[in-house]
Amino acid sequence: MDELFTTATIVGILSSAVRLATPYLYAAIGETLAQRSGVLNLGVDGIMLMGAFSAFYVVYNTENLLTGLLAAAGVGLLMGLLMAVASVTMKAEQGISGIGLYLFGLGLSSLLFRIMLGTVESVDGFPRLNIPLLSDIPLLGEIFFNHSILVYGAFLLVPLTAFLLNRTTWGLNIRAVGNNPQAADALGVNVQAIRYATVCAGGMLAGIGGAALSISALNIFQENLTNGLGFIAVALVYFGGWRPVGVLLGVLLFSFVNSLQLWLQVIGIDIPSDIAVMLPYILTIIVVSIPFRRGSEPAALTRPFSRGA
Amino acid sequence: MGGFGSVSGITQTLAKATPLLLVGLGIAIAFRASMINIGGEGQIMAGAMASTMCALALRDLPGIVLLPLSALAGTLAGGFWAFIPGILKARLGANEILTTVMMNGIALQLTNFLLRGPMLDPAQIAAGTNIPQSEALPMHVWLPRLVPRTLFHAGFIVAIVLAVGVYILLWHTTLGYRIRAVGQNRFASRYAGIPVPQYMTLSMTLSGCFCGLAGAFEIMGVHRRVVEGFSGGYGFSGIVVALFGYLHPLGIIPASVLFGGLLVGADRMQRAVQVPSSLIIALNGLIVLFVVSSRVWVEYRNNRRAAQQASQDTNDDTAAPLPTRPTPEQERA
């Protein structure tokens, strides 16, 4: 037990918490955008799987990391577009169309994996990028400034999204569409276009989140690589009260517990690993059951918009 | 050649249709109450584990007692696994889609843990191979096979009877009427004096009972012991079946046979021409997307028909695949 309280271990836990937060952060911030405009996209996990596969496949064949990342973003965008067509234009029940999208992504990524790769391979992912000066700060440097570029990107995304939502006309329109689409429509805001944009952007970010797993954090691809990570990301949006900073706090809390759980196993504290892996799921159930921020839920969440309805 | 062309194909199809039918019925009950149950997979596992534990622990009882008792244990365990998300939704407003997905994860990890530790087959330990599977069920809890040397077991008949039962429950009892009323409009239901939270929890629990029974039957009728990955994604395919059957028991029966055939065809395709069976998962996803997207056309058609028939009552609730969900404001109220 003493081993847990050494500086090296604590730095290790916190550093890997920051790294583990990355895929959640991309997915959850993207989902925040979609939900603020009134669309609940439950297919995030499927989009992440497709993003993870495309990024991995491109990098495996071309060894070009940037192309891989772009592929993931593009595939994610297309998956988001599919969701938008179903939920915005076709007005499908969002909870269920999201599950459809999830199954589609899960099945297709497994299918492509079996046909195009066949076995679990590994690639050289994004290297660690020490930020000059900052990474030399004792302890903090190792925790925060000793990661791949995708990790920094994820954390930059939080203030950017907060700025977009709260300080720009676009953000105002997104929030208006999510709270009162009728009023927004009457004022000349194109409700459907805004929703298409946020769902596609959310899909793109989820795709990048998948790439953050397959070509940055784990550097492998296997069937169902995400293992429900996308659903947890959706739950964290609820927990974060639909605010980017709140989402960030939720993600950090979550990845801290996750990282602690991994380190406990590494150190050899005797918890059966199957039981320890349950921890995030139980935590998620508790998180979505806390009613304290329910008031900030976008009023039109999950409600398709049609004029004159 | 596929799932319908030969006797062996048809029996395999019906064997796969059995869990699909049970899960589909369960999902339909929950969806009718506007409770979205994505946790079929976890409820199947809970049911399978509980019925196996019951059958192994009480193996000295005669089959006529033990068989129904084990099935009941599975049913109750599945119900319990759905009760948790149900009551969290009804009392605290926790999004049931997310909680049921998480309950799937917990059930999977719990199953893995039990199969590697407490429930690991003593024969595996003795042989030192440690393949994660439970001890085989005693023969007197095996469900009888309807056609010898196939996987087609008596559970199918039970499932058909239950389908009729669900039809009667939903459309010819007060309980079913209230479940549907809660699904259509929680607001109005409350003013009509229906205790809405109880009915939300109840519909979810009932839904889980069906999935739990499906899990118990999979073990007692097909595998005869718990093996890894036995649930075969039925929890998700069952949603597709329920939607494809328009959330109506009489639609779900043919839908389950159709999708059973699809699964058998996919297995054979994988063996014959190496097309991975994950194709079916992707296809299921697309079917879900198309079915829920088609609702706008159904409504359009209904609206036109309603307009043509002037002010006639067109309360044809089997035509709408899904009741509308209440707004967040209404949920908070």
Image (spheres, coloured by chain):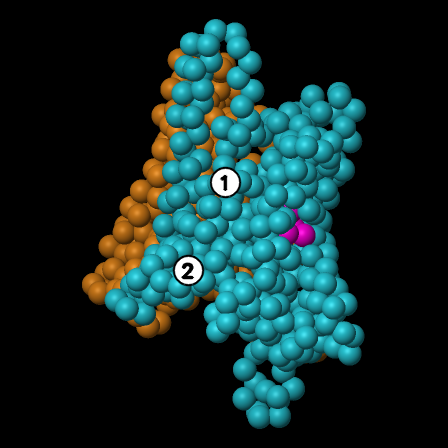
Chain colours: A orange, B cyan
Classed neighbour count for the residue bearing mark 2: other residues with Cα under 10 Å, few (<14), some (14–19), many (≥20) = some
Give the x, y percent position of residue A20: 50, 60
Q: Position of residue A269 (x, y in %)?
A: 67, 77
Tag 2: residue type? Ile
Q: What is the x, y in percent for residue B79?
A: 70, 52
In the picture as drawn, the residue positioned furthest to the top comes out as B310
Look at the image and say whether residue B250 sits in the magenta stretch: no
Reading the image, the residue beneath label 2 is B10
The outermost residue toward the left is A62
> Quick one: label 1, few (<14), some, or many (20+) residues within 10 Å?
some
The answer to which quarter of the image holds residue A149 is bottom left
Residue at image position (35%, 39%) is A82
Could you say which is closer to the camera, residue A131 or residue A4? A4
Q: What segment carries the magenta color?
A: B207-211
Residue type at tag 1: Gly
**Residue at the (37%, 57%) spot, across then down:** B4
Residue at screen point 69% across, 23% down = B187
